[in-house]
Image (cartoon, rainbow, N blue to C red):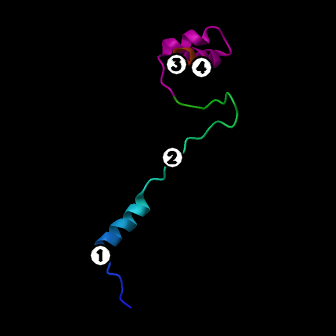
Amino acid sequence: MTRRPTNPRDAAEAAFKAATAKPERVKETPAIPGRREQVTLRVDAAVVEWFQEEGPGWQDRMADALARAAGKA
């Protein structure tokens, strides 16, 4: 019985590639329709103040405005 010859460099490179490969990202579908995601966003203070002028619910109004601008509302 003969052993299959292996190149140590090829074996090391394959092992390194397997150990350092990033897992493929799978885009999750929302479990709940209309689900919201928390993000950090830098917005001019004047824009935030404009939305806050009408009181509570300013974040919802801002989200609605962004959705309309993106053509999603």
Crowdedness of circle 4 by 10 Å Cα count: few (<14), some, many (20+)? Answer: few
Q: Amino acid at mark 1?
A: Asn
Image point (36%, 86%), residue name: 3
Q: Main secondary structure of the magenta part?
A: helix
Between the residue at mark 3 and the residue at mark 2, the CA separation in whole angstroms equals: 24 Å
* Residue 59 lies in quadrant: top right
Locate the N terminus by quadrant. Answer: bottom left
Crowdedness of circle 3 by 10 Å Cα count: few (<14), some, many (20+)? Answer: few
Q: Earlier in the sequence, mark 1 or mark 3?
A: 1
Q: Are marks 2 and 1 in contact (CB under 8 Å)?
A: no
Q: Are marks 3 and 4 in contact (CB under 8 Å)?
A: no
Locate the C terminus by quadrant. Answer: top right
Q: Secondary structure at mark 1?
A: loop
Q: Earlier in the sequence, mark 4 or mark 1?
A: 1
Q: Are marks 1 and 3 in contact (CB under 8 Å)?
A: no
Query: Image check: 27 left or right of 54?
Result: left
Image point (65%, 36%), residue name: 30
Query: Image check: 50 left or right of 18?
Result: right
* Marking on residue 25: 2
Image point (62%, 38%), residue name: 29
Spot occupied by residue 69 in the image (x, y as percentages of width and height):
52, 15
Q: Amino acid at mark 2?
A: Arg
Spot occupied by residue 58 in the image (x, y as percentages of width and height):
63, 15
Mark 4, residue position: 63
Between the residue at mark 2 and the residue at mark 1, the CA separation in whole angstroms equals: 32 Å
Q: Earlier in the sequence, mark 2 or mark 4?
A: 2
Q: Secondary structure at mark 3?
A: loop
Mark 1, residue position: 7
Which region of the structure is painted magenta? 41-66
Q: Earlier in the sequence, mark 3 or mark 4?
A: 4
